[in-house]
Amino acid sequence: MAFASEVQMPLLETAILGNDVRIYFPELVNIYGCRIGDETTVGPFVEIQKGAVIGAKCKISSHAFICDGVTLEDEIFVGHGVIFTNDMWPRATGTDGKPKGPDDWQLSTTHVKRRASLGSGSTILAGLTIGEAAMVGAGSVVTKDIPDFAIVVGNPARVVGDSRVRDEGN
């Protein structure tokens, strides 16, 4: 197993990595222009784009996509295959049929608060806030803000419980 400090990757070099960040199989990630906090782990086949901010002690599982405009606070769990979006009205071309360029869209930001957990295969649409210690069930599609401590499931994701009840048992 190789760690970021042991393997030099051209794109990875553009990222700002905190202390003890572990990037498993750095040759299998696409990480550039982002910030990743202390003691965070990143699995293989992950993309973290420029402008994304990852806090400390996060776990980013394999096949996750974290785009520009996403901020994860500390202690966030991102399950396998979690996808974030950052464009409310995505199009490949304008109404004139010409390909859209970098200036032809508006970045929509997403904020995930401390200790939230995003289940495998969930999709987080652009422009949302996921509350502190909230839990998003596997395969859920998050289309609106999630309150602190909420457990949400489904498509669209809806509140079904309170994560504090579960945390009391740990």
Image: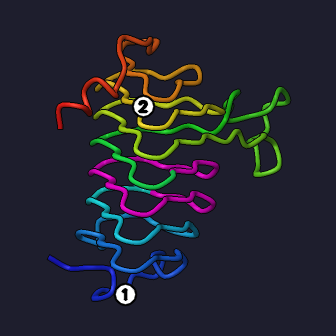
Q: Name the amino acid, label 2.
A: Ala
Q: Name the amino acid, label 1.
A: Gln
Task: Name the image quarter holding the C terminus.
Answer: top left
Badge 2: how crowded within 10 Å, few (<14), some, or many (20+)? many
- Percent of width and height locating residue 62: 27, 51
Gap between marks 2 and 1 measured at Cα: 36 Å
Query: What residue appears at the point 67 percent right and 31 percent down from the top-left corner?
Result: 90
Query: What residue appears at the point 44 percent right and 30 percent down from the top-left corner?
Result: 123
Q: Residue furthest front?
A: 168
Compare marks 2 and 1 and give the one earlier in the sequence: 1
Q: Which mark is residue 158?
A: none
Q: Which residue is mark 2?
A: 134
- Percent of width and height locating residue 118: 36, 36
74, 80: nearer the viewer: 74
Q: Which residue is mark 1?
A: 8
**In screen coordinates, is 116 left or right of 59?**
right
Bounds of the magenta segment: 48-72
Query: What residue appears at the point 66 percent right and 35 percent down from the top-left corner?
Result: 87
Residue 36 shown in magenta = no
